[in-house]
C-alpha cells in the first residue's frame, strides 16, 4: 500500500495458517514490496497451510527446526541465495509449551518439557541471531523482531512456563541487540501483542475469558493479528531505524491500565450486592 | 518491639486520625524507640484527632502548611530543637485533589484546583526536602519516605489528577534523592501502597469496588495501613541503608499481576454465558 | 515518500527553527501527504523562523499560548476550518524551564519558576487534549504524540525541574489517553528521544558532555531530529492504530543499556591506572 | 541485634566463603535469632569454607545439587527434621555460567554450557520452590528471596548469558510467587544487588572497571555484601509481609540513574578536549 518495504529482503518464521500473526505479516510485507523466505518447523509445515501463503506471496518455504544450528545455517544461506543478497528483516514468531499442552500445572512441571519449551521458544532466538551475526547476513539498518507476551512482566496464571520463556526471549533481544547494534547497525526489538485468537493461542486454558477481560480493560480494545502485522511492518521500515532493545506493547493500551471503568463496574456491583444484599442494579444494564 | 529505631529522630506528616497510615507509622515508630514530631496542615489538625496520637506517643504537634516554605522552615528548626539534634527519618503522607472532591471529571478539570492539588500533593515534597537540605537538617544515612499510589504508573480512572500528582512526586523523589544521596548520604524512596480505607482514601468514587477488585487480584490480598507502617519502619531502619531512588510496591503483589484466577473466573463465566446463552454455571457457585 | 499521511490533517506545536524536531516532523508530514497547521507561543514565533517552514509546507501559522485555554480553543477551531474537518494527528513539542535558564540548582528552585515551567511544559498537554476532547475535534483512530525525555524515569542532574515536568506529562498521556481511547478511539503516546542538539536542548548545562556519553552508550548512537520525525510519522500513520498509553524510547538503545564496552573501557583504564600507579595502557589507544 | 528473626527457621543456599552475600546473610540471620540449614552444591562445599560458617552459627550443612529434585527433596525434608518444623525463610543465591568461565563471547555460545548455566542458575529456583510447595514445607507468611542482578533489565555486555538467566529467574519469582502467595501466604521476591566483589563476581571480565563505574554512578555508592545481608533480613522479617512478586533494587540508587555529575565530568572534559584540541582542564583536577 505504501511501498514501505520496497527492495527489502526478509525471513519470516511461524506462519502456520491464516490466523497466524506471521501469516498476516507476510501478506502485509508482500503488499509493501518486500521479498522474503517463509520458514517453520517441519511438523508445523505439515500441520498448517503455509504453501498457500507461499504461492500468494511468491515466496519459497525452507523448513527449519529452530533448535538446530545446522538448520538455521542452511536457512540463512539459502535465503541469501534465493533473495539475492543480505537480509533486511526477520520475524521470530515461535513458541510452544508442552507443559501447557499436557495441562501440567505451573507449580508441578515436567522439567524435560520445560527445557524443550525454553529451547524452542526462547533459546531459538539466540540461535537465530547467532547464525545471522556469524554469517554477517544482515544489511546495515536491518530489523529483527520477535513476538512476545506481557506474561513476561506480569502474572497470567494459565500462561504457565511460556511466561518465563518470554522473559528469557526479551532478555536475549536486549543482550544480543546490543552487539548486533554496535557491530552491524541492526536493531532488535520484541512486540508484546494482545491475546490473539491464533490456532496456537486459542489452545491456552481460559483463553476466551482472558480475551474478554483484556477487551474490557483496553481503551482501544484488543489488537488483532492484522493490526500486529501493520505494526511489525512499521518496525521493519526505515521509519524506525533508531528504535532498538525495546519491548513494544501493541495491545490497545492494556499494559498501562490499572482498571477500566467497565471492569470497575462489575466489581462495584458485586461489592454493592454484598453490602445491599444482592438487589439487582439498574446500572449494570447501562453497560455497553 | 525490636528497637529498630532506638535513638532515631523523625518528622511525620499526615496523621489525620487512627485510620491514617501516618498514624499507624507514628505508633509503630514509637514502639520501635523513635522520638518524633507530628505535623499536618492547620485545617487537618482541626478536623482530625492528632492530639490523641501526640499524647499516646509523647510527641509534640507543629502545624505546617506544606505549601509554605516558611512553615516548613519553622517546622524543621523547631523539630531539631525539640528532638535535640538532626533528623533521621521523615514521612511525607500528604495528598488532596479538589477536582476529586468536587467530582470534576479528569477530562474537564478546573485548572486552579489542579494547580492547588499539585502544589499540596507533589511540589510539597520538593519544598520539604529543599528545606531539610538547605538547613543540613538530616543525619547521614537518614531516610525520607513519601507515600504514593500506582496510578502514577497505570490508569485508575477515578484517581483523577492525583495520578499525575503522584507521578510528579515520584519523580521528585528520584531527582532530589540523587542530590540528597550524593551530598548528605540520605536515602529517598516512595512506597506505593494498596488502596487503603483511610478517611481520605474512602472518599474516592468507586473506592469499594476498587478495594474489592484489588483484593481479588492480589495473591496476598490488599496491604493494610498497619502493614504499611511496618514496611515504612523497615525503610527507616538501618537495614535498608543502600536502598534509594526506588518506588517500592507494598500491595500484596497487585502491581505485577496481569490477571488472577479469581478475576479470570468472573470473565470466563461471563464469556461462557455469552456463548452458551446465559445458562447458569455450576462453577460460579464454587467461588469463595 | 510513502504517502503514509495522505489525506490526514494535523496540528504541530513547537517548530522554532530548522533544528527543531517539530520542524523536521512538519517537513516529513508534508512529504507524506498531510495538511497541517503550525503553532507556537507568540514569543517563540518572533524568535524563530517558522514562517519559512509554513511557506515550504503550504501551512498556516496560528499563534497559541499553551497555558491559555482560550488560545487553544481558537487554535483548534481555526485549524478545523482551515483544514476542512477534524484532526488526525497532533504533535506536542513544548517545554521550558526558567530554573534551567537562570541556572538555579535543582535543590534550590524559585517555585514561581517551577510552577510556570510545569504549567507550560506539562499541564499544557492536559489543556490541549481537554480542548480537543471537549470540542470532539479528533477523528477516530487519530494519534496524539508528545515529546519527552528519559529524565522522567532516571536521574540526569542537569535536566533540573524538566525531569519532573516530563514525568507529569507522561502521566497525563496515560490518564487522558485512557479516556481519549475509550470515548473517541484516539491514541495518545509519548516519544522519549535521545538528547538532540536543538536550539532549546543545547542550552542545557553540560549538554555536549551528555551527548558524548549517550553516543558512546547507545549501540546505534544517538537518534537525530530527522530520525525522530520519521518515527513520529510512523506513530501518526495507520500502521500503529492499537499502540496507546505508551512511552516509546527512540534513542538508539540508550534506555536499556547498563554499560557499553566503550564506556567500560574508560573505567577499566582508570581503575587499572589507580591499581598500577598510572602507567599508560596500550589498550586505551585501541579505542575507536 | 534486633531479634527480628527470633524463632524463625530457614534454608540458606550459596555461602561459599566469607565474601559471599549468603555467608553474610547467614551471620546476620544468626545474630537476629534464626535457626537455619546451610546448603550448597557438593563441589562448592569442597572449594569453599562453609564448615567454618556452620560452626560459627550452630548450623548443619546439607549438600544439594540444585538441579536435582531428589537432592532438593532430601534437603527440605532433612531441614524440617533438623529445625523442628516448617520453614520461614529461604535464600537462593546460586548462579554460574560456563560460557563466562570459558571466555565464550555472548554472540557465540556453546549451547550445552548455556543450558547448564540456565538449569543451575534459573530453573533451580523453580525446582526449589516446587519442592517447597509440593511438600507444603513453608509456614504462612514465610519469605523466599533470590539474589539477582540488573543485567536482567539492562545490557551489561560482560555479564553474558547470566543476564538472560537472571531474567528467567525473576520471571519465575513472579510466576511461582503468585501461586505461593495465593495458596500458602508465602511471599517471593528477588533482590537486585550492586556489583559485589565476591569470589564468584570478581571472576567476571572487567569486574573492577564496572565496580568503579557503578560506584561513581550511584549516589550512595555500591552496596556491600553485608548491607545486602541486612536488607535480606528485612525481607525475611515480619515487617515486609505484603511485599511480593517484586524485584527490589539494592544498589545505592544505581538503577534509577541516567548519569551522575562525576561521570558527566569525565565526558565533558573529553568533549571539551576534542573541541579545544586537548588542552588540559583545571576542572579535572577538582574531581575527588
Image: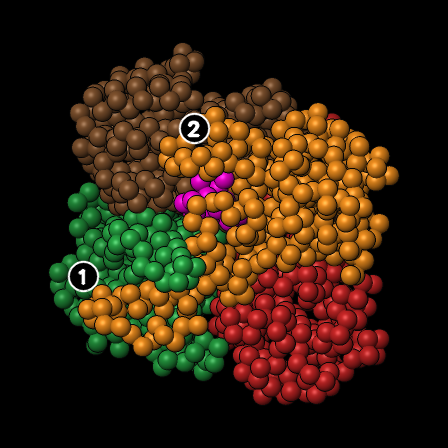
Chain colours: A brown, B red, C green, D orange
| Distance Cα–Cα, label 1 vs label 2 | 59 Å
Residue indicated by mark 1: C59
- Judge whether residue D151 is colored magenta: yes
Q: In the displayed image of the protein, which residue is found farthest to the right? A: D84
SS state under label 1: loop
Residue indicated by mark 2: D110
- Which one is nearer the viewer's eye here, A195 or D283? D283
- Which one is nearer the viewer's eye here, D87 or B103? D87
Picture residue at 59% right of the left edge, 57% below the top: D224
In the displayed structure, A59 sits above or below B105; it is: above
Q: Position of residue C196 (x, y in %)?
A: 28, 61
Picture residue at 37% right of the left edge, 51% below the top: C260
Prevailing secondary structure class for the magenta stretch in the rendered image: helix
Q: Marks 1 and 2: CB-CB under 8 Å? A: no
**Side (left or right) of B212 relative to D6:** left
Q: Position of residue C107 (x, y in %)?
A: 48, 77
- Judge whether residue A79 is colored magenta: no
Q: Residues within 10 Å of mark 1 (few under 14, many from 20)?
A: some
Q: Give the quarter of the image for residue D260.
A: bottom left
Per the rendered image, the range of residues in magenta is D149-163
Amino acid at each position: 500500500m505504501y511501498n514501505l518495504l520496497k527492495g527489502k529482503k526478509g525471513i519470516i518464521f511461524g506462519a502456520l495458517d491464516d490466523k497466524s500473526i506471521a501469516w498476516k505479516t507476510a501478506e502485509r510485507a508482500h503488499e509493501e514490496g518486500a521479498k522474503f523466505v517463509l520458514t517453520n518447523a517441519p511438523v508445523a509445515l505439515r500441520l498448517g497451510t503455509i504453501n498457500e501463503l507461499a504461492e500468494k506471496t511468491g515466496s519459497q518455504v525452507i523448513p527449519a527446526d529452530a533448535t538446530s544450528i545446522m538448520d538455521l545455517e542452511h536457512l540463512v544461506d539459502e535465503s541469501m541465495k534465493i533473495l539475492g543478497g543480505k537480509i533486511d528483516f526477520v520475524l521470530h514468531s515461535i513458541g510452544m509449551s508442552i507443559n501447557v499442552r499436557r495441562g501440567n500445572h505451573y507449580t508441578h512441571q515436567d522439567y524435560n518439557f520445560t527445557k524443550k519449551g525454553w529451547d524452542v521458544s526462547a533459546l531459538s532466538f539466540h540461535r537465530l541471531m547467532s547464525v545471522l551475526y556469524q554469517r554477517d547476513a544482515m544489511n546495515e539498518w536491518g530489523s529483527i523482531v520477535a513476538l512476545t507476551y506481557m506474561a513476561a512482566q506480569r502474572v497470567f496464571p494459565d500462561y504457565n512456563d511460556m511466561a518465563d520463556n518470554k522473559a528469557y526471549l526479551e532478555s536475549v533481544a536486549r543482550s544480543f541487540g546490543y552487539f548486533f547494534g554496535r557491530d552491524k547497525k541492526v536493531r532488535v526489538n520484541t512486540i508484546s501483542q494482545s491475546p490473539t485468537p491464533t490456532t496456537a493461542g486459542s489452545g491456552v486454558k481460559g483463553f476466551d475469558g482472558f480475551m474478554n477481560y483484556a477487551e474490557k480493560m483496553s481503551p482501544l480494545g484488543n489488537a488483532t493479528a492484522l493490526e500486529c502485522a501493520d505494526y511489525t511492518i512499521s518496525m521493519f521500515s526505515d521509519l524506525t531505524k533508531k528504535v532498538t532493545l525495546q519491548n513494544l506493547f501493541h495491545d490497545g493500551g492494556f499494559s498501562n491500565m490499572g482498571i477500566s471503568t467497565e471492569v470497575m463496574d462489575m466489581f462495584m456491583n458485586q461489592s454493592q450486592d454484598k453490602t445491599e444484599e444482592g438487589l439487582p442494579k439498574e446500572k449494570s444494564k447501562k453497560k455497553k
